[in-house]
Image (cartoon, rainbow, N blue to C red):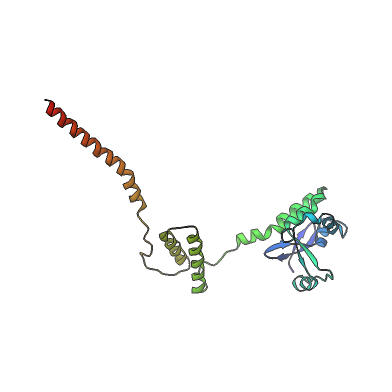
């Protein structure tokens, strides 16, 4: 099992449902607290902790199979939010230092790893490219995107995955031309009105003369 050094303690890296978690025993160890301290803090304030958000519960079989932990009564896996709630009462200088190390170097390290992960540009199969294009299409359609925008997104996906498509696959409307026409129309209309008015005025003056 991989570990991360926190306050000279080799903290085992444990994950559950895509996020880093830890145990009461590990929290006591990194904070140099007597074993049972974190569990007592939890039991005293359990009504404030939300299962599925601040902690997860695994039964004895799951604990042994997933983490190699022998726990006759099962275990509670503590998330980042649960950890921060637990250690509110740990206010000594060491506790503040350990909290920063544990949050930045352990809990949030997985998020940083995901951001740095390089995903392949080319699709490993045509099916993978099609599935991605379908997902894009569904999201854009639900957002009310115009058909030509969905086509443009598909074209970019095809280029990313190295798929050749016809040159005129995307035919976006000439919005700029339309906008210019709409902008110019009132001005042109005003000009025509002015011309007509001037002509009528000249005719009127001619009759008077």
Q: Quadrant of the N terminus?
A: bottom right
Residue at 80% x, 71% y is: 60
Q: Is residue 73 left or right of 190 when viewed as pictured?
A: right
Frontmost residue, 25 versus 195 = 195
Task: Work out which quarter of the rendered image holds the C terminus and state it.
Answer: top left
Residue 202 vertical placement versus 47 (above, below) = above
**Labels in figure, total:** 0
The residue lying at 21 percent from left, 36 percent from top is 196
From the top left corner, tell me how far across and down residue 52 is, in percent: 72, 61
Q: Is residue 143 left or right of residue 208?
A: right
Residue 137 in picture, x, y percent from top left: 48, 64
Kindly give the residue lying farthest to the top in the view shown: 209
Does residue 205 appear left or right of residue 54 in this picture?
Answer: left
Taking the spot 34% from the left edge, 50% from the top edge, the residue there is: 178
Quadrant of residue 115 within the rendered picture: bottom right
In-front residue for pair 22/131 = 131
Task: Tell me if residue 2 comes above or below residue 199 in the rendering.
Answer: below
Residue 67 rendering spot, x and y as whole percentages: 76, 70
Expressed as whole percent of the image width and height from the top left, the position of residue 2 reads 73, 67
From the viewer's perspective, tell me whether residue 57 is left or right of residue 180. Answer: right
């Amino acid at each position: 099992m991989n570990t991360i050094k926190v306050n000279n303690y080799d903290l085992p890296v444990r994950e559950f449902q895509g996020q880093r978690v830890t145990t009461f025993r590990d929290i006591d160890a990194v904070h140099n607290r007597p074993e049972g301290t974190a569990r007592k803090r939890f039991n005293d304030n359990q009504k404030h902790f939300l299962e599925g958000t601040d902690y997860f519960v695994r039964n004895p079989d799951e604990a042994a199979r997933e983490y190699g932990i022998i726990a006759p009564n099962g275990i509670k896996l503590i998330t980042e939010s649960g950890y921060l709630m637990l250690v509110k009462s740990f206010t000594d200088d060491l506790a503040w230092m350990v909290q920063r190390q544990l949050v930045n170097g352990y809990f949030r390290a997985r998020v940083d790893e995901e951001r740095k992960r390089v995903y392949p540009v080319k699709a490993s199969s045509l099916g993978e490219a099609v599935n991605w294009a379908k997902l894009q299409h569904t999201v854009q359609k639900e957002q009310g995107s115009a058909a030509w925008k969905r086509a443009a997104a598909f074209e970019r996906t095809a280029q990313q995955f190295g798929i050749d498509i016809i040159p005129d696959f995307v035919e976006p409307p000439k919005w700029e031309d339309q906008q210019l026409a709409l902008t110019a129309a009132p001005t042109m209309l005003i000009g025509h009105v002015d011309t007509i008015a001037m002509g009528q005025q000249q005719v009127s003056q001619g009759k008077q003369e």
